[in-house]
Image (tube, rainbow, N blue to C red):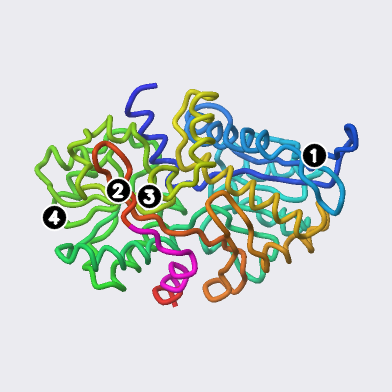
Amino acid sequence: MNKWFSVAAIVVLCLTLVIGVACGGGGEDEEGVKEVKFGAGLPLAGFWGAVIGIPAKDGVELANDKIGEFTVAGQSYRWKLYHEENYWTTAGGVASASKLIYENGVKIMHQSGTDAGRAAQSLCEGSGVLLDGSAGLGFLGPDKPHSFYFAPSYETHAPAFFHWLTEEHPEVKTAVATATDDMLGHEFAHACKASAEYFGLDWLGTEYIPAGTVELYPIATKLVSKDPDLVIGSVLTMQPMLEMGWDGITAYTMWSSSDADYVGWENVENGKYLLWLPNPYGEWLTQEVKDFAAEYDTKFGMEFTGGPFWAATILSVLTDALRKAGTTDDIDKIVATLETETFDTWIGPLKFGGEELVGIDHLLLWPVIIADLEDQAYHVLTVVPADEAYELAVEVYK
């Protein structure tokens, strides 16, 4: 796999929060152990499969192996995994959701990709199927009682990052962003703009990248012409900007060592490249996550990055939710449990919020991990607790 492709995979993953889960009631007994169905609509072939679907699928499968048997209301269960091709499209979202519901009998579902997730939403809501779409705050609301957002959200992380930035880097006065020219990209840019302006920065705009764009020098040229102190963007736009003489700070959401291979460690260290979503690196991780990452790297021959990390974490949340709900098939009880309980995970307790932002507690709140790169390693600068980050988000968006 060439360096551009590896970096592109991380860029895509950071603008698509990917984890697929679906569950239905217990299946056939195997020595007293029942199955709980999992499934997902996600891309499984081609470019999108390579950079999105397969890493998430691998992360869920390894997490499932680690979880093994678990007990709900005195009965032993295992997860059974289903994966359906959704082609990363609206039509694919509907088709895969239909198959998962009507052929596989799932009651909880994920759709990878904003277009696919929102396309499947009406079908899932109408069928009483719990859906994780991780497709922006507009995906949630009291009129969508079965829709959840499990992955780390830009909307709750951007305010905490910009609050920290304005305190730690007072020299930064202006900011600009790059984003994919789709629904999720526009929501990402909106979160950055609202947060930057709330904390006093001059927002210089967003340069959107159309689908299929390969040559990024025209985008980089537009960014350099604005002469921003801060660019919210990846190393793919950072590299040509550096070649044009720009010397500001870049900040992004996801990280992989292939990013440094692409742009050079000397260009990302010492505060030149900041990160602000939970990545599976650095001092904040538990030994359990580190061990899982090492096994993932060995088993699949790929670096354990944000996508599979979030996938495995979410599977842990769902497992704990079923235990606490005392059921694997009563969706009303599972929904109520997700809304009210705190869940034990390998990164600490997590809970859902969102009522103040979207009218319903269906948004999983993650800690904000702000980091930079030093001595060819990911270095955590600060951890903003999930509840504090959420309070900042309410301030910014309300």
Q: Amino acid at mark 3?
A: Thr
- In the image, is residue 391 part of the stretch drawn in magenta? yes
Label 2 packing within 10 angstroms: few (<14), some (14-19), many (20+):
many
Q: Amino acid at mark 2?
A: Gly
Q: Earlier in the sequence, mark 4 or mark 2?
A: 4
Report the front residue among 201 and 162: 162
The secondary structure that most of the magenta stretch takes on is helix
Per the image, label 2 sits on a secondary structure element best described as loop
- In the image, is residue 352 part of the stretch drawn in magenta? no
Label 3 packing within 10 angstroms: few (<14), some (14-19), many (20+):
many
Q: Which residues are magenta?
A: 382-393
Residue 122 position, x and y percent, is: 69, 57
Please name the residue that numbered disc 4 is placed on. 227
Residue 37 position, x and y percent, is: 77, 41
Please name the residue that numbered disc 1 is placed on. 104
Q: Amino acid at mark 4?
A: Asp
Residue 314 position, x and y percent, is: 60, 49
In the rendered image, which quarter is residue 397 located in? bottom left
Please name the residue that numbered disc 3 is placed on. 253
Q: Are marks 4 and 1 in contact (CB under 8 Å)?
A: no
Q: Earlier in the sequence, mark 3 or mark 1?
A: 1
Q: Which mark is residue 233?
A: 2
Q: Earlier in the sequence, mark 4 or mark 1?
A: 1
Q: Quadrant of the C terminus?
A: bottom left
Q: Residue at x 46, y 54 (%)?
A: 183
Per the image, label 4 sits on a secondary structure element best described as loop
Q: CA distance from mark 2 to mark 1?
A: 40 Å
